[in-house]
Amino acid sequence: MSDSETKRHHRPIRSFVIRGARMTLRQQKGWDLLWPKQGCAVENGMLNYDERFGEHSEVVLEIGFGMGDSLAEMAANNPDTGFIGVEVHRPGVGAILCAMDEMSLDNICLFCEDANDVLAHCIPDASLDRVQLYFPDPWHKARHHKRRLVQPEFAQKIRQKLKVGGTFHMATDWENYAEHMMEVMSAAEGYENISGDGQYTPRPDYRPTTKFERRGERLGHGVWDLIFKRTS
């Protein structure tokens, strides 16, 4: 096997898939004007939460915030909480930057990077109160299930960054992926399902519903929330 073939076979699971990144004028303006102030980079190393957020009660990491509507809403509703948002699609980053400016939000810092790199190089161990993974790519074809982000190794990466007692909150509108998440997390060392073995959790008040989610509910699509607590 050649070196290039070996690299392909051992390529780590990424937290995203790029499917186009054309920005609107508004999104581009948000990126150009606000990214230098609000953006974070992996190359800058570990975050200092006190320097970034000032006094805060909790720190929450959201992986893959899409266009950022729900993340901005959570930040507005919880001004004493520091939010770290990770998203690789520049249109989504540009959109939330505009929202942050319009809503005068200063409790969000943003990464336009792969979440695995952010976790490894920027998030101190045992420092997060909650990690949020809402509606990740379901990779619905069976032959692609290995590409799903929620895997045993990823669960332990998240556990390492959570405080003991902190939670990993996942949500999906694909029942098969919900079942996959439940299987992986139920077997993961150092976690406990807050709703009991094998049980899904009603959507907590802090997770806003998105336009996409509301549209799915009107069409009869289900949504499954899972919340697992770090126990050790």
Image: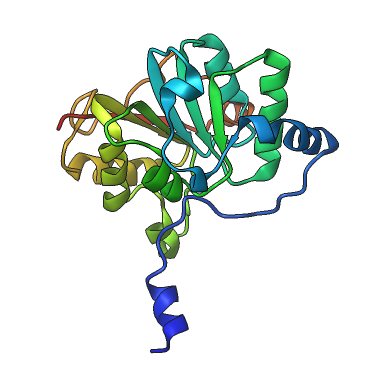
Q: Quadrant of the C terminus?
A: top left
37 lies left or right of 76: right
130 lies left or right of 217: left
Q: Is residue 60 visible?
A: yes
Across and down, in percent, residue 155 comes to: 29, 44
Above or below residue 25? Residue 202 is above
* Residue furthest to the right: 25
Above or below residue 126? Residue 74 is above
Q: Is residue 137 visible?
A: no
177 lies left or right of 35: left
Above or below residue 143? Residue 182 is above
| Residue 26 picture quarter | top right
Q: Nearer the viewer, residue 127 or 65?
A: 127
Across and down, in percent, residue 221 comes to: 52, 33
222 lies left or right of 227: right
Across and down, in percent, residue 215 comes to: 62, 28
Above or below residue 102? Residue 229 is below
Tell me which residue sits at (39%, 80%) in the image.
Answer: 6
Tell me which residue sits at (59%, 21%) in the image.
Answer: 72
| Residue 187 picture quarter | top left
Tell me which residue sits at (37%, 47%) in the image.
Answer: 120
Across and down, in percent, residue 178 comes to: 37, 40
Q: Quadrant of the N terminus?
A: bottom left
